[in-house]
Image (cartoon, coloured by chain):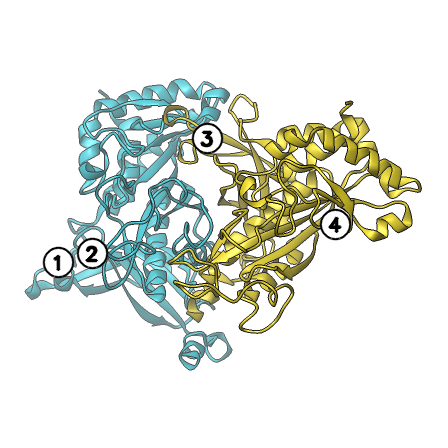
Chain colours: A cyan, B yellow
Amino acid sequence: MSLLEDLVSINLSDTTEKIITEYIWIGGSGMDMRSKARTLPGPVSDPSKIPKWNYDGSSTDQAPGDDSEVILYPQAIFKDPFRRGNNILVICDAYTPAGEPIPTNKRFNAAKIFSHPDVVAEEPWYGIEQEYTLLQKDVHWPLGWPVGGYPGPQGPYYCGAGTDKAFGRDIVNSHYKACLYAGINISGINGEVMPGQWEFQVGPAVGISAGDELWVARYILERITEIAGVVLSFDPKPIQGDWNGAGAHTNYSTKSMRSDGGTDVIKKAIEKLGLRHKEHIAAYGEGNERRLTGHHETADINTFSWGVANRGASVRVGRETEKNGKGYFEDRRPASNMDPYVVTSMIAETTILWKP
Amino acid sequence: MSLLSDLINLNLSETTDKIIAEYIWIGGSGMDIRSKARTLPGPVTDPSKLPTWNYDGSSTGQAPGEDSEVILYPQAIFKDPFRRGNNILVMCDCYTPAGEPIPTNKRFNAAKIFSHPDVAAEETWYGIEQEYTLLQKDVKWPLGWPVGGYPGPQGPYYCAAGVDKAFGRDVVDSHYKACLYAGINISGINGEVMPGQWEFQVGPAVGISAGDELWIARYILERITEIAGVVLSFDPKPIQGDWNGAGAHTNYSTKSMRSDGGYEVIKKAIEKLRKRHKEHIAAYGEGNERRLTGRHETADINTFVWGVANRGASIRVGRETEKNGKGYFEDRRPASNMDPYVVTSMIAETTILWKP
């Protein structure tokens, strides 16, 4: 297919000033990513200089057929790792023609929370550990698993290498470089406990950018698995039985937590999270009850617990934070299919704004 | 899949100063190699400038779930032959949060031995001949062997070429160049007596670096076999019957052995090794009793014998060393699955420090 690849990889800067802009948004299910592209007259680096656009909301379950236009507001720009050159990816959120955020637009509310002066002053940092599973294309069985059977039990796969231990590394490694190229703050990757499952981390990112960056990273992953011919799953418990689920552990800190005396601030914040456990769980991803069982390095969904270095807890504080008296903590409850706008803003809201 | 390779091979130095560092460590079995990657802000050449890290020891048999953090201390840097650019591989060893080496950390003790003034003064050189077997992915039968049967008997395969004699050369040759690129002291390769079995040699390497370099060479081999879709085995006797096993012959010399009169020093060292034969054998790899039978170019496991040019001995001294009156000797006892930190430091300890 090298002729096709030659065309896909043409460097247009040699022949024209025009650039291609891929507008990305979240569809009606809250997890389906959509995108379409348009030509712009020249390079752009400021989202406010990118024109609004619209799409057919009746095809994504976000508008009725007789009034189907949903308006896209560009919010953040990233370099396009697929088209390269001056071409860009633009993460957008969705509004009615009258300018109201549509119900599935979770970014709008998150941005409001993140612009509250008390929250801004605390400079909330996020590090999100996105886990995901790769599935074979025709049978929806994990990549590398024998069809009609199972691989050997968990043990050898976490951070493993070798044909019999790591399935799909090309996807993970191309995703890593593609995200760095795009300008996403991707901080690392690792093979996960369940074979065919992987993780990448985005962060530290401040406020609303955590959600923007994670969504674009997810989009890039969806595009890469498309090239590779494997199916991407964010299901929190893809295989029942003695197999780990997939989460999106969210690491969090505020200015006060990162300063001297921070561990007391951390403990108070964790207590507030404990008091709103049910509300958070309800917003932490569909199907999480299949994953948060108390086994496989999770805490049971109905229990709120926290501990230092304890991977069976709802919230884990790292040993280094304990030792330094300041740092961050890890909320291990969110599922892999959580919406980062919702989770990041809710953690900020509960720990900074909410009074018990 | 060239679009995927374009992404994997992106040269990030054009868009960012950031580099990717792959931290590598040895897991709970003592032979499972684990790794994960993180982004660093810029190029690094000095291991002491790399941050320590941590991993989930409960997933590798090295820590309990409620106190799962194991700390990684970077010890040596190599260029990453897979990501290239300024990206690096980092060999690490493992500690508790309190700073104690965990039980499976064999490097710590080896480093102590190698920093003993008497050992340092002798400039211990090592050349390790790592043998390994390639297996087919779905049936765990050697690469190139007919499923359900056997190839013709040993004879034609040692150092041979031809589709009916050499199975898997691409793996061996790409490994050779990748290791040279990485900065490993890989001194050669050859096809082995058993078809599907190969050997590479690392050295001469001084002191602790022999272990570091061999482990990274093993990691690179695991990654390359993963790409090639074949299974890597370090089992010392993969096939019972009239088929050679796999060893890790360890060539050794000290400053005194390499100087005039060295042959006498060599003989004294071999005497000391004879006296500690049982202790060494116990540390020379699991399952070695299946390999050290007295046949197939090995000495029986319960017997210690040495000789010039004798491949059926425990220790072999080369004809050139005998002729020059100085040089090195080869300990043929270690199995392919030995830990080079243990073997190299034990040989130094017995021959330099131990008093009978």
Discs 1 and 4 lie in a common subunit: no
Mark 2, other Cα within 10 Å: few <14 / some 14–19 / many ≥20: many
The amino acid on which the numbered mark 3 sits, given as a three-letter code, is Gln
Query: Left or right: B196 with respect to A63?
Result: right
The amino acid on which the numbered mark 1 sits, given as a three-letter code, is Asp
Q: In the image, which is nearer the foreground, mark 4 or mark 3?
A: 4
Q: Position of residue B40 (x, y in %)?
A: 54, 45
Q: Nearer the viewer, residue B26 or A132?
A: B26
Q: Is residue B8 visible?
A: yes
On residue B62, the disc is: 3
Quote the CA–CA distance across marks 1 and 4: 78 Å
- Name the subunit of mark 1: A
Q: Position of residue B351 (x, y in %)?
A: 77, 31
Discs 1 and 3 lie in a common subunit: no
- Name the subunit of mark 2: A
On residue B310, the disc is: 4
Q: Which residue is mark 2?
A: A27
Mark 1, other Cα within 10 Å: few <14 / some 14–19 / many ≥20: some
